[in-house]
Image: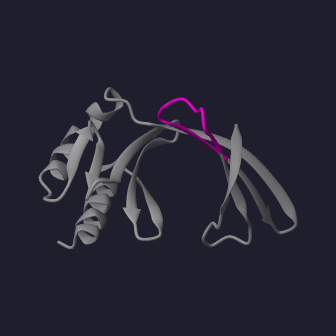
Amino acid sequence: MFFFEKKEPKNFCSFGAALVSKTKPKGIKVFLLLFVHKKKRFFSLRIMKHATPEALIGLAGLLESIRLRDGLREKKTGIFYRSGQSFLHFHEDPAGMFADLRNPDGWDRYKVDTPGKQAALLAALDAALGR
């Protein structure tokens, strides 16, 4: 069973819909996006799964830095909660490793493949935690 959820992408003259299965395999979300830009239509199907513990080994230093922050609880490796709500988690993708950080309007995605990009995530995390 599938249903559509309307999405409003920022900085695009487009619209999109997320195709979510109620019986989806754990940790996998399928997004169906339709973008209209300059009278051209683009269709893409993208699968991005949560990072496995093996994939998170390369981010051990980053994870240790995150674990030092107060107010976060790590229920599973690489999945952090704040006030009982999912707050930070990681994805692996052929394009690299990404972190999703909750904001008041949804999620912000950060690429975390380099130390500079990891520092940007930590700065955003500190801002979100009010540090």
Q: Where is residue 13 in the image (x, y as percent from the top left)?
A: 73, 72
- Between 1 and 49, which is closer to the camera in this rendering? 1
Furthest-top residue in this view:
54
Q: Is residue 102 visible?
A: yes
Q: Which residue is drawn at 13% across and 59% down?
A: 70
The quadrant holding residue 101 is: bottom left
Q: Residue at x 48, y 31 (%)?
A: 26
Identify the colour scheme used: one colour
The quadrant holding residue 76 is: top left
Q: In which quarter of the image is the C terminus?
A: bottom left
Locate residue 7 relative to residue 119 in the image: left or right: right
Residue 21 inside the magenta-drawn segment = yes
Q: Position of residue 37 (x, y in %)?
A: 79, 66
Q: Residue at x 27, y 31 (%)?
A: 57
Q: In which quarter of the image is the N terminus?
A: top right
Q: How many labels does the image show?
A: 0
Q: Where is residue 18 in the image (x, y as percent from the top left)?
A: 65, 51
Whether 74 is drawn above or below 85: the answer is above
Whether 124 is drawn above or below 76: the answer is below
Q: Where is residue 83 in the image (x, y as percent from the top left)?
A: 25, 59
Residue 73 inside the magenta-drawn segment = no
Magenta residues span: 20-31
Whether 73 is drawn above or below 105: the answer is above
